[in-house]
Image (cartoon, rainbow, N blue to C red):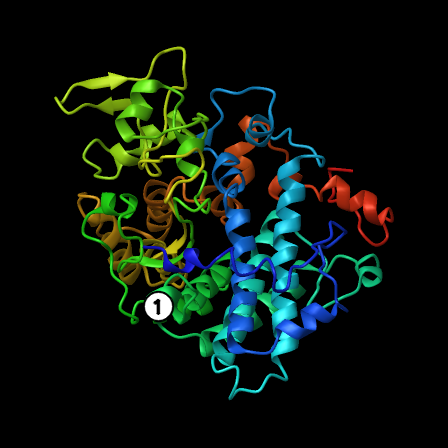
Amino acid sequence: MKNLTYILRYLVASVVFISCSKDFLEIDPVSTANIEAVYKTDKDFQDAVIGIYNALADQYQNFWQFGDLRGDDSESQMYKGVATDFMNDFTLDNSAGILQSSWANYYTMINRANMVLERIESADASVVTNKNRHIGEAKFLRAFAYFDLVRIFGNVPIVTHVITDEESYTLGRGKVDEIYNEIIIKDLLDAETLLPESYSGVNIGRVTKGAAKAILGRVYLTRHDFTSAEIKLTEVTTMGYALLSDFNKLFDYSNEHHSEYIFDAEYEEGMNLGSIFTNNFCPNVPFISNFFGVNGVRSDNQNPTDGLFAIFADEDLRKDITVARGITDENGNFIPLPSQQVRSFTKKYMTPVAVTNDSKANWKIIRYADVLLMLAEAMNENDKTDEALVYLNYVHERAGLESYAKLTKDETREKIYTERRLELAFEGHRWFDLVRTGKAYETMQPYGMRPYMTIFPIPLAQIQVINNPEILPQNPGYE
């Protein structure tokens, strides 16, 4: 049960976010007496932090378009001439709604985190009894928002305190290196010292010390700081996480807070707090939706490519749930998708849904298999190939495949890259892996990518609000 989600959205509307403006950085008012009044008790700060999670959950409903659809493992088979098609074929322009909504969601997270951090500084620790935890959560979530922002947009405005409307129009774009060094890494280092290792009861689902270390390891890997990545990811392996014995159990959604779970975007069915993933990815084919119990609109998105099918061995236990061209019924008969519909779909998010876009399926932001594969990658780059193979094989063998042995460093690197595709497909990683490893252009050029498209355009609405290229220039190539 996703206990955190039960308290996610009902508490925040009347706390800090009384009148969220739609200006440049989605800033909230800074001089409202009502806002000052609510920052008094531990519960006030807890509710305010929940508001940051709320913005994260909103953003991750469509994060798959960046992480999956932009890459070579997912495609838009059904709809042409629409936004997902433009994302898929590299014709997305700066007026796209997903760019504006993502910019707004991440800066809402940042502003809400800044509000908490600024007001909690002087809070009485005897009254705000979870003060350190609230600071750790706010810093983690602010760092995470900036991490996604720089991966998506490159240089972005740096906001680390509560600002006025007037200030927001004068902020230029901070450099990526500065954002990593002065915000992302520092905030995550602070968070890992302040956060608990686990929670119980209604707090299950909040970020933990392990989540901070794991995301920090991902940050170091993205920066090609393989030494720091190895150190941090090794620490995660000592914290009690473990792979589930059955890969498919990751996607049955009966219990998402298991030994492999580290951090999710949390959703809950039945309270209008569900995710859109099941309906969004389910083929609009009655026998498919009936088989999985998916009611409401089905949108045919997140279609596995032929290239992804091709790299799965038949004996790979992950294949059936990850990539499908139909279903096998209760009598063992295979029923293929109709030829006039989408050619493929993923079952990773297929779970019964009573009401459209109200699924209990979470988005797995980071899980232990990802940590093991990142650690293998870092170790291999640090010339520890034999040790790297140990961690690679944990994931590979769980899929029912024979272990790797006696590989060169270059061979191991490619095996790890492939394993990430097989293990983490449709979990928001492929595009960012391609960019991180320098393989984006060589892989995606046949699909329409140009060299400058490793980042996305700054949203047109933001460019128009500032209307000053000296302060907010467009990314090169998108002018």
* 474 or 85, nearer to the observer: 85
Q: Is residue 301 left or right of 182 when viewed as pictured? A: left
Q: So how many labels did they put on this image?
A: 1
In the displayed structure, would residue 239 be above or below residue 282? Answer: below
Q: Secondary structure at mark 1?
A: helix
| Image location of residue 255, percent across then percent down | 27, 52
Residue 394: x %, y % from top left? 23, 55
Question: Quadrant where the C terminus lies?
Answer: top right
Q: Amino acid at mark 1?
A: Val
Residue bearing mark 1: 236
Residue nearest the observer in this picture, 286 or 343 = 286
Asked if 159 appears above or below 304 in the picture, the reply is below
Dividing the image into 4 quarters, which one contains the N terminus?
bottom left
Q: Can residue 80 be seen at all in this image of the molecule? A: yes
Q: In front: 374, or 463?
A: 463
Q: What residue is rendered at 33% in x and 38% in y?
A: 348
Residue at the spot x=26%, y=43% of the render? 252
Specify few, some or many for label 1: CA neighbours under 10 Å numbering under 14, 14-19, or 20 or more: many
Q: Residue shown at 28%/22% (left/top)?
A: 326
